[in-house]
Image (cartoon, rainbow, N blue to C red):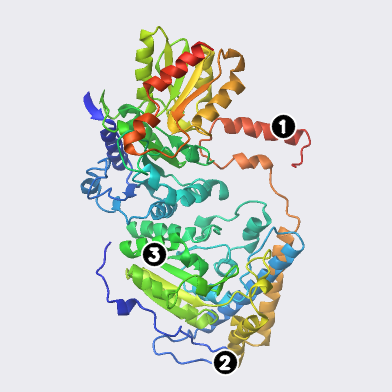
Amino acid sequence: MMAVTLAQAINHALVDAMEADPRVLVLGEDVGRLGGVFRVTDGLLSKFGEQRCIDTPLAESGIIGASVGLAMAGWRPVPEIQFDGFAYPAFEQIVSHVAKFANRSRGTVRLPMTIRIPFGGGIGAIEHHSESPETYWAHTSGLKVFVPATPDDAYSMMREAIVADDPVIFLEPKRRYWTKADVELPVSTAPARQALVRRDGSTVTVFAYGPMVKTALDAAAVADDHGWSLQVVDLRSLSPLDVDTIVSSVQQTGRAIVVHEASRTLGMGAEIAALIQEHAFYALEAPVLRVTGFDTPYPPARLENFWLPGVDRILDAVQQVLTY
Amino acid sequence: MHRPVRDPSELLPPGEPVQLLQPDGVLREHPEFAPVSDPQLLRSMLRHMVVTRQVDQEAINLQRQGQLAVYASCRGQEAAQVGSALALADGDWIFPSYREIGAAITRGIDPTGLMHMYRGTWLADHDPYAERFGLMTIPIATQVLHATGFAMGTAMDGKDVVTVAYFGDGATSEGDAHEAMTFAGVFNAPVVFFVQNNQWAISVPVERQTAAPSLAHKAVGYGIVGRRCDGNDVLATYAVMSEAVERARSGGGPTLIEAMTYRMESHTTSDDANRYRGEDEVAAAAARDPIDRFQAFLARSGVIDDEFAASVAGEAAARSQQVRDAVYDAPHGDPTELFDHVYVDPNGHFAGQREQLARELAAGGGGV
């Protein structure tokens, strides 16, 4: 066992995947010589050479569009978009081609790509570096969306994403990059499509993913002092969603809260609330509440702690559903 | 992978587009390029151009009869498409836009499959790997990046493959064309950027796409070679394309070719070009018709005779009839196929939605 950060776990996963399959390559801005602005691709250039760890021009659509061609040529690209807010130039390539090629070609052309995007706030960054664009990807048929919350999952889900023949948007919770855990690598956790109960509890389920899993667990620890028993479910994959685990958890607790950094309106919380009322209506003791960022643009860094959901906002919602 | 920076003068296109065959069908001397003389190749050029024109006309007819949702004609661009596609080896790849029916026919692809995109029976209907011809791409210039990435990929594998991106004058304004040529230059990818400058992007003339001296001049900004040819001259197009393909094949890097041509029809069958361009201009373009001049040249030089012309006309009619027979009233497939190809490992809720559609079908639902 050794203590690894979430960023290191992804780095290990990339190294192991590239060693396991000579068709896997990494490309993006600053991924080679620098090793990535978060050092997630550190060491890949010296280990695998500049053909398999490619520093590209500064052009996100180019990175993704070229990856489509590389995949068609039989490679297994793992392109990096440096920050969430810079994925948008590649939006057309992702939505119109990465997601649709398999369907358009009746399965003749598969694009086994894993698009890495560090996402979310809480690191005091300037504008465009703290966004949560997961709904765009989860809403797009043809993509899978994986969001690890822990180092062991980051490793295991990255390995799973790279070997998958479906394209995967891999959202890395950048504020948790430095979270450490004792992990024996390589590690294989549950398949990504399976949500995991991170903490058992009996009165309220808190659904979270990525950076908010730790926040939800922190809230659950405080809730204990109030005598409130929170069950924390880490969704892990936003597309597909593990509907069975979501529903069975609500059937146990009767109350549900969904937590995400992304703005509320039409966020993942809306989808999960809809699924719960479709599948567990009679189990509900209270309305499903959403604990989220506000429906404003992401705030300036000095204000982000007023905007981001934290323990207090979660506990307020817990109190609301318990006193409904 | 990287190559030394070249002198800009090597990259700039010469002032005049290369022309080897004048609009009157008379050969013209060129200091650098010579016309091909192999009679079999010359006949093949004519055959593909004539077949393309008739299949293209058949598609327009089919659209007028409600059989296709829409169709984008390549009438007037036959020399550009046939001349460029014939310069490729069998293993080379094309990444086309939606207007490349001529390039497809030249590559031996059954055009009926391509018509399913326009009919809407499915979104595409050929195997790109079998034909080495990508799916006809609708979002403008996006396929140019796929071509570049593909060329990077085949080069890393050491494969003897040249990849060609087909796009239009309007597409050169898109960011993806810019990024594709940027990447191709940096990585010295074995790719040819073949721009058919047909003068119009729907209603917008090429003067509104760029203030550059020509589209080919843009090449110098990417550190790649720029060339221009008379795209209504199949001999010039073939010659300039062959040079570019050879450059790519031998590791000399990408070329941007601007083939000067003209879109004789409206943008698509849904468009009305009379709203934005005059008859004089179209008549002038008709006088530069790619097939007329080439046919005149071949007849005069004895490469073809009446018998050959008749056999080509017969083949064009037969191919058009095949398209008509295959497309007319062609049924769509089982609607539940909509769920079959999206994922290798489908999301769980797909099963439920597929069952819903199956129930609606079983209840006699014929769609709204």
Residue closest to the eye, B108 or B55: B55
Disc 3: host chain: B
Q: Chain of mark 2?
A: B
Secondary structure type for disc 1: helix
Q: Are marks 1 and 2 on the same chain?
A: yes
* Closer mark to the observer between disc 1 and disc 2: 1
Question: Nearer the observer, disc 2 or disc 3?
Answer: 3
Q: Position of residue A82 (x, y in %)?
A: 33, 45
| Neighbours of disc 1 within 10 Å: few (<14), some (14-19), many (20+) | few
The kind of residue on which mark 2 rests is: Ser
Kindly identify which numbered label has been placed on residue B359: 1
Spot occupied by residue B14 in the image (x, y as percentages of width and height): 39, 83
- Pick whichever, A69 or A135, lies toward us: A135
Assess whether mark 2 and mark 1 are in contact (beta carbons under 8 angstroms). Answer: no
Residue located at (56% from left, 18% from top): A287
Identify the residue under disc 3.
Answer: B181
Amino acid carrying mark 1 in the image: Arg
Question: Mark 1 or mark 2: which comes first in sequence?
Answer: 2
Which amino acid is tagged 3?
Met
* Secondary element at image label 2: loop
Residue at left 56%, top 22%? Answer: A276
* Quadrant showing the N terminus of chain A: top left
Q: Which residue is mark 2?
A: B301
